[in-house]
Image (cartoon, rainbow, N blue to C red):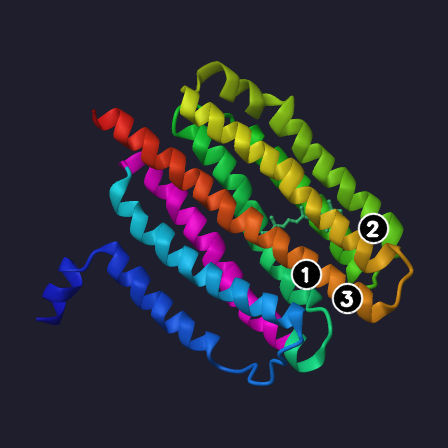
């Protein structure tokens, strides 16, 4: 009987179950959240928005055609991984009032490469993409994050670390605006995919620019450390909403539109 249930249950069932279990973690602690701790409140809000987005992306896999399913899976994984890290980050912040740098960077180290994979997938759904595109996006990501971490965790002076991070990001921007990835999109993609690709690269430009702004206000203004920590975390949190949830919604939108177009 159990086997029968196992074989009949579809993917959304399993992901929903898994998420349900994950959510129990969300209620685990942080009982000391103060009504005037706005940074703490933002951690809470975003944790929940990330959980809801994960449900949404996994369930919506059902309505798109096969070649788009992986993209939605990856979007859901990004918000799932971030949700779990937000539970931990929220606790560090609420309980100690300090910046949860390690959890933040572990999260980024997994989710930023996944977002880069989305670029690759969205192009792969319509054209053959050389592996070099993928590797260049990965290298840029690593340089950017290692630079940032060395600065934020105190292994290096904050300014040179910032410069290293900026160089990694510049390398990614070059690839998506002028490199091979952009040429493939311009040459072979249908209009809706080109539009999505275009929006995604503006997210990587404008949306991602919010992070170095956060770093600047967190470490480079010479202000009171408590104010700097507040600003740093609120700016990073807002940036995550845009770059994880909105980014996923753009992909969901193009996947849905393209699936309907090819069905008709
Ligand atoms: C879901 C998380 C995302 C999309 C995180 C993105 C993070 C960045 C774009 C970080 C960029 C940084 C620089 C460009 C300069 C150095 C400091 C960083 C690491 C904050």
Q: Which residue is mark 1?
A: 234
Magenta-colored span: 65-92
Q: Which residue is mark 2?
A: 161
Name the magenta segment's main secondary structure.
helix
Task: Kindly check if marks 1 and 2 are in contact, taking CB atoms under 8 A apart as contact.
Answer: no
Where is residue 134 shown, x and y percent of the image?
Answer: 55, 34
Judging depth in this view, the residue of 233 and 151 nearest the camera is: 233
| Quadrant in the picture for residue 199 | top right
Residue farthest along the top direction in this orientation: 187
The image quadrant where one finds the C terminus is: top left
Mark 2 beta carbon near ligand 1 (under 8 Å): yes
Tell me which label, 3 or 1, sits earlier in the chain: 3
Q: Identify the residue at image location x=69%, y=56%.
A: 235
The relative height of residue 119 versus residue 155 in the rendered view (above or below) is above
- Secondary element at tag 1: helix
Q: Which residue is mark 3?
A: 229
Real-space Cα separation, disc 3 to disc 2, in angstroms: 18 Å
Q: Is residue 44 left or right of residue 151?
A: left
The relative height of residue 49 versus residue 170 in the rendered view (above or below) is below
Tell me which label, 1 or 2, sits earlier in the chain: 2
Residue farthest along the right direction in this orientation: 222
Of circles 3 and 2, the one toward us is 3
Residue farthest along the bottom direction in this orientation: 32
Of circles 1 and 2, the one toward us is 1
Mark 3 beta carbon near ligand 1 (under 8 Å): no
Residue 235 is covered by the magenta coloring: no
């Amino acid at each position: 009987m159990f086997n029968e249930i196992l074989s009949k249950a579809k993917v959304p069932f399993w992901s929903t179950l898994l998420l349900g279990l994950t959510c129990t973690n969300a209620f685990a602690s942080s009982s000391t959240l103060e009504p005037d701790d706005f940074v703490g409140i933002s951690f809470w809000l975003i944790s929940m928005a990330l959980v809801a987005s994960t449900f949404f992306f996994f369930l919506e896999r059902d309505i798109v055609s096969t070649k788009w399913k992986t993209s939605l899976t990856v979007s859901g994984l990004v918000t799932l991984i971030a949700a779990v890290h937000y539970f931990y980050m929220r606790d560090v912040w609420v309980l100690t009032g300090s910046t949860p740098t390690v959890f933040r960077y572990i999260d980024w180290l997994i989710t930023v490469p996944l977002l880069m994979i989305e670029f690759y997938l969205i192009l792969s759904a319509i054209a053959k993409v050389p592996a070099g595109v993928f590797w260049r996006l990965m290298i840029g990501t690593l340089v950017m994050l290692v630079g940032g971490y060395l600065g934020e965790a105190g292994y290096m002076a904050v300014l040179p670390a910032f410069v290293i991070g900026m160089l990694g990001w510049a390398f990614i921007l070059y690839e998506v605006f002028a490199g091979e990835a952009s040429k493939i999109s311009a040459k072979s993609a249908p209009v809706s995919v080109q539009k999505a690709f275009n929006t995604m690269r503006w997210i990587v430009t404008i949306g991602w620019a919010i992070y170095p702004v956060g770093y600047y206000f967190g470490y480079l203004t010479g202000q009171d450390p408590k104010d700097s920590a507040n600003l740093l975390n609120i700016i990073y949190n807002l940036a995550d909403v845009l770059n994880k949830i909105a980014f996923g919604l753009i992909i969901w939108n193009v996947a849905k539109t393209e699936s309907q177009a090819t069905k008709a």
